[in-house]
Image (spheres, rainbow, N blue to C red):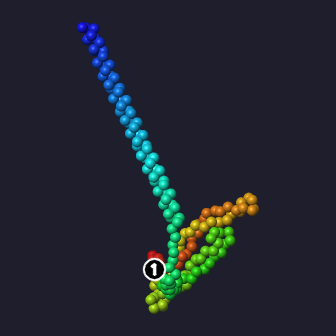
Amino acid sequence: MQGSDTCCALCVPALKSHQGTSIFILKMQLSLVFRAVLLLYLLAQLLNGASQKRSKRKSIKEKRVILDPSLNISVNVHPSPSRSLSPWTYEESWDSSRIPSKISEAKCDKKSCLTKDGEEDFGLESKPIYYQINILRRVKNKNAMHYALKLETKIVSLGCTCVLPVVVPQN
């Protein structure tokens, strides 16, 4: 009996160890199956998103705008520079080495602003409104037949506005 007890004592731990290993293998297989299913789902989502993007691109390219020629609305609007309380005119500068070659800039017509009656109000000053734009400058390469483009910025005046004068107190 003692021999059979020894055999059973040896078999039970071996059986428990075998059950633990099979549970571990089963969990590992489930984990791999789960990962595979998750990977397939993500791949399907990715492919579906790509096909939707392609169809959106095609629909954007194919849209047309048709204007109705019977809607001929004529609005007699004066240009805004002449209607402003701080009127301005445009001056054009030209530089063949610059892109764009022609740039229009505003120049204030008066030093002061106008009232609603069209008279000058010397309590206000007419000042330009500045804006920074990007331009490209043509720069010749070593090979005289080609040129490179260099990105630069330029500050231009877009229009004019009325401002309070700057008063510097004297001590």
Q: Residue at x 68, y 63 (%)?
A: 139
- Determine if residue 83 is in view: no
What amino acid is found at the position of numbered circle 1 in the picture?
A: Leu
Q: Residue at x 75, y 62 (%)?
A: 144
Where 94 falls versus 14 (above or below)? below
Expressed as whole percent of the image width and height from the top left, the position of residue 162 reads: 47, 81
Viewed as shown, does residue 40 lie left or right of 21?
right
Could you say which quadrant of the image residue 33 lies in? top left
- Determine if residue 46 is in view: yes
Could you say which quadrant of the image residue 17 lies in? top left
Where 53 falls versus 120 (above or below)? above
Of the pair 122 and 134, the residue shown nearer to us: 134
Expressed as whole percent of the image width and height from the top left, the position of residue 5 reads: 26, 11
Viewed as shown, does residue 111 lie left or right of 5?
right
Of the pair 84 and 63, the residue shown nearer to us: 63
Q: Residue at x 57, y 71 (%)?
A: 155
Quadrant of the image for the N terminus?
Answer: top left
